[in-house]
Amino acid sequence: MKPGPNAPPPRITRRGLMLLGIQLGVVGVLGWRMRDLQIEQNEHFAMLADENRINLRLIPPARGIIYDRNGAPLAVNRQNYRVTMVREQAKDPAAVLARLAEIIDLPPEAREKALREMEGRSAFVPVVVAEHLVWDDLVRVSANTPILPGVLTEVGLSRYYPHGGDTGHIVGYVGPVSESDLAKLESPDPLLQIPRFQIGKTGIEQRMEADLRGHAGALKIEVSAAGRVMRELGRVEGTAGGDLTLTLDENLQTYAMRRMAGESAASVVIDVSNGDIVALASSPGFDPNLFVFGIGGRDWNALLHDEYRPLAAKAVTGAYPPGSTFKPVVALAGLTAGTLRPGDSVHCPGFTSLGNRRFHCWKHGGHGSVDLRKSLSQSCDCYYYEVARRTGADAISEMAHRLGLGYRHDLPLPAVAEGLMPDSAWKKANRGETWTTGDSFNYGIGQGFTLASPLQLAVMASRVATGVEVVPRIVKAVGGVEIPVAPRKSLGLDPAHLRAVQGGMFAVSNEGTAYRSRSAEPLMAGKTGTSQVRVITAAERAAGVTKNEQLPWGRRDHALFIAYAPADNPRYAIAQIVEHGGGGSAVAAPIARDILLYAVYGGLPPLSAYPPEQRGKIEDERARMPAAEAAPPVPLPPGQRRNRA
């Protein structure tokens, strides 16, 4: 039955009220939650909603600085303005790069290189697309980041070598990590994944990489959906690499390079009191700055095809027949073995016969009666043929090794030569032949199988000068901590034998073959050497041996000289080689004399250090000497001079 028109309205039941209340409560909670999500937590959830909104990036550490012994910087870091791109944030990298090219100079080949690099790396890894920008370019890119998604501007550090080619062979250079670099490592440092992160490629930079690199920091940043960096959320600074102090004296090193200018040559100077290598010069040099960001084809070809081999660190990697600079070793071997006494004489008619073959002395008419002092002073070959015949290869080899030859010295440089000081067992094992008297004759004058580097010859000169086991070193301190000097051990040689050889070397410089390269005061003791690089036939000898200056450069003899000074209280020893320079007395000795005097005087020696009749010539030579390259000023970032020793 339907209610009438005057019937009272239906009442709301308690159940209805409860349902209404529940509905209103649910709506209220939803409204509050919506407000909370949209207003209170808007920033948090907006950040989570955008893909890769928070990025964690490694901060490359500052590479350690390399100094010389006096604190002069040899390798430093300079600011480098650059632009990077993250592929996944750019969405269309090619289009973004095209827009970037309208803002800064970015040629097509640079864009193609960047795209290839992005394809080879994870999508979230930043890739460098342009670097070494000027400040105005950096500002323009920064101002246009809203239309350049995925593009970031950065201020990094790049390596710079203030002294260029003067120290290039020692310090080496850095370069971007290559795939081959990564393939050599089982667990590569995450730093090496940073695009174009630079590591040592050669020289000290390579061998001391672990000390110089440092440890990465971390940067947490907020990035918009378009790829624009909104803010920095956190930063943990890395640890800078340790500074290195080398034993080199940069002033002496520079002078040595200037003095050898125009020659294919090498010079090594050692402080005999502690083994410090104060000069390690190979001429010509190369500028390591060319390699830091990738050397151009023209520069590379010029270095590669230069017959003077500027890329070769001749001072440590070169292995040459030592020629007559080896004679002090043979003399000490004979004296120690008892096959020679200082007063023994040998007659030199200009040759020594062995069967139907003649072994010639450099002096065609011979030296007549020769004792030890005269044999060194006049560099008589026949004397040393006889000493080597009496003494034998094994005793000579043992003495050579005792004096630092035929041994790879432990230096943090690549391809340090071992040289070769053969003995009878070596020839049997390597040539399948028995050692002969003719082999001993060649050994006696530093020819035949014998090979030594300038570094080894400098060590040998140091040990002959002092009678102790001078151990060469090139790194003086790491991270401000001094590296201990190796203990000075006696070589166990008879002092009388040493004095006899030292006296002969003093005579070389002051009355013998190096007399024209003496100092005003009798300061030096040395030994000249000339090593052949060609075979002189009997027919050529009968017709007259062709002079070096008449031969093509590559067939001329090597010129060598070793010395130490002061003779009565040795402080420095030197080994000098001029490739295909001709005679050691005429070419190598004058260069070595000047460099050694520079070391002794602690700077350019006064003209009074030279014989009066030579001072005008020395003045002219100095005027013609190339000036040191003017290195541009290097702005060092704050705190870069951290650990100078």
Image (tube, rainbow, N blue to C red):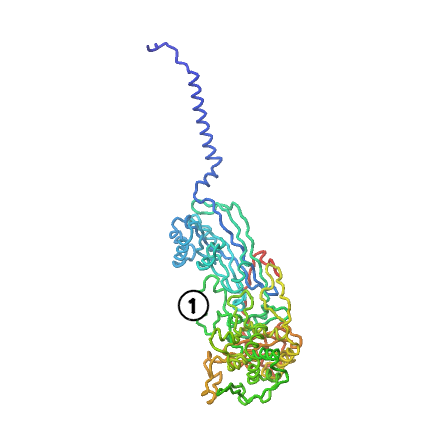
State left or right for residue 66 relative to residue 228: right
Q: Position of residue 281 (x, y in %)?
A: 54, 71
Q: Nearer the viewer, residue 480 or 16?
A: 480
Say which quadrant the C terminus sits in. bottom right
Give the x, y percent position of residue 481: 62, 60
Q: Amino acid at mark 1?
A: Arg
72 in relation to 452, above or below: above
Q: Position of residue 108 (x, y in %)?
A: 38, 58
Above or below — where is 622 with respect to 32?
below
Camera-side residue of 262 and 443: 443
What residue is shown at x 66% (from left), y 78% (from top)? 496
In which quadrant is the N terminus drawn? Answer: top left
Q: Secondary structure at mark 1?
A: helix
Q: Is residue 95 left or right of residue 332?
A: left
Instruction: Decide: is 488 above or below 635.
Output: below
Please state the total of marks drawn on the protein image.
1
| Residue placed furthest toward the left | 1
Q: Is residue 301 above or below residue 534?
A: above
Residue topped by disc 1: 298
